[in-house]
Amino acid sequence: MAKIVFIGAGSFGFTRTLVRDILTFPLLRDSTISLMDIDEERLEFIKKAVEKIIEIGKYPAKLEVTMDRRKALKNADAVICTILAGGVKIWRYDVEIPKKYGVDFCVGDTRGIAGIFRALRTIPIMLDICKDIEQLCPDAIFLNYTNPMSMLCRAMQKQFPNLKITGLCHSVQGTAEMLASWIEAKIEQIEYVCAGINHQAWFIEFKKDGKDAYPLIKKAILENEKIYKEEIVRNEMFLALGYYVTESSGHNSEYNWWFRKRQDLIEKYCLPGTGWNPGEYAYILKEYLKREDIWKDEIKKYLQQPVNLERGHEYASYIINAYLGGEPYVFNGNVPNLNIIPNLPYGACVEVPVLVNRRGLNYIHVGPLPPQCAALNNINIAVEEMAVEGALTGNPEMVYYAACYDPLTASVLSLREIKQLVSEMFEKNKNYLPQFKNIKF
């Protein structure tokens, strides 16, 4: 009987979806599901949802609910993390303060000055979780869904190299399915190799029925205005760079110099009403703030509706099943670059194909990326490496250096303006940054 732990179980959408998926595997249907969160009210809601899934599926699973992380982790076989450090009340300033300086974020949870400060707040908590895992369940596989993915995984993997840690994101399989639909193919007809860094991995191969499908994708983008506008930023990047990148246009518009440095460019490329995440200012923050008022009503509504027990396409359940003895599984995970991609820095967190089986996480060698793809990855990795070093050492200067080289921040601000912005961000976040004894630099 497996024990599967959810840290941050109050992330209702993720938890109920992943529990549903996990219990569809014969090997896992009698698992002990341990739900842990620091929010008692959210924990009570997710408890009811999981009880409903177990009851309707007639699963012999057991359920534990606790606010004690160490109790949850004791003897765990798998750990899934979906936490949000500080909540929306502090995250909002990651987006709102840079806007005062002209740095315009759509999401602000992954990269840039916003992603850096989210990482600074979250890394100490993630390291504490790893310490508990090392003591209480050292053989467990640790699956992280929390952003900023690359920086969190880099910090954990650097400090705890012997733990089985990987980060998961649905942008790879989601993008593959989107591209397949554009060329009127079923996903079963598609083969691909995708590698790079989280939210900026590249489909270095994308084939339909064994043949290169990129000409079909390019034709669809150029000839169908609806498809072009659906992912306008990513489509522009593809037409320029020759390879398609993962994650939405809204996210990707924040990771480079090309789309958000002037208002006219924002109006041209970050269009409201196009795609699920078009790039408009504070798009995700606005969604989160709406949920603050309605999340309880949405959960109550879910609890009254029929439950679909069909397995989804998130990686986590397949990974846990494979690690605990089921069918081996290949997925794209965030792991240390042990020469997997030679033209990206050794040890940096990369998103690459991984084979999971009873032995654990087996990284698949990719080889060098096309130089134009590696160039953009490398500048973002450099920023992340400095930010992580700052977080681990409590050195505010390293955080400033990271901000100086962030593509979006640097395309808008001077060095002195960046210093002023970083100082203000430190001041607003100081109560959430125990690793920094001094925030002056």
Image (spheres, rainbow, N blue to C red):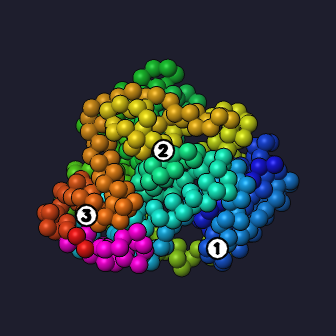
Q: Residues within 10 Å of mark 1 (few under 14, many from 20)?
A: some
Residue occupying the point 71% across, 54% down? 76
* Foreground of the two, 172 or 271: 172
In this view, the residue in front, 165 or 307, is 165
Identified by mark 1, the residue type is Arg
Find residue 334 and name its label. 2
Of residue 275 and residue 433, the one placed in the foreground of this image is 433
Name the residue: 67% across, 70% down: 68
Residue 178 position in % (x across, y down): 47, 41
Q: Tell me if residue 428 is in the magenta stretch.
A: yes
- Mark 2 neighbour density, 10 Å: few (under 14) some (14–19) many (20 or more): many
Give the label on residue 42, or none. 1
Q: Quadrant of the C terminus?
A: bottom left
Numbered tag placed on residue 397 in the rendering: 3
Residue 268 to residue 243: above or below? below
Q: In the rendering, at what x and y percent does residue 164 appear?
A: 58, 45
* Residue type, mark 3 in image: Glu
Q: Disc 3 on helix, strand or loop?
A: helix
> Which-is-in-front pick, marks 3 and 2?
3
**Quadrant assignment, res 121:** bottom left
Name the N-terminal-most of marks 3 and 2.
2
Q: Which mark is residue 30?
A: none
How far separated are the C-alphas under marks 3 and 1?
A: 38 Å
Badge count: 3
Closer to the chain start, of discs 2 and 1, is 1
Please provide the residue range marked out in magenta.
420-439
First in sequence, mark 3 or 1: give its number. Answer: 1
When the figure is inspected, residue 366 is found, relative to residue 147, above or below; the finding is above
- Compute the Cα span from label 2 to label 1: 28 Å
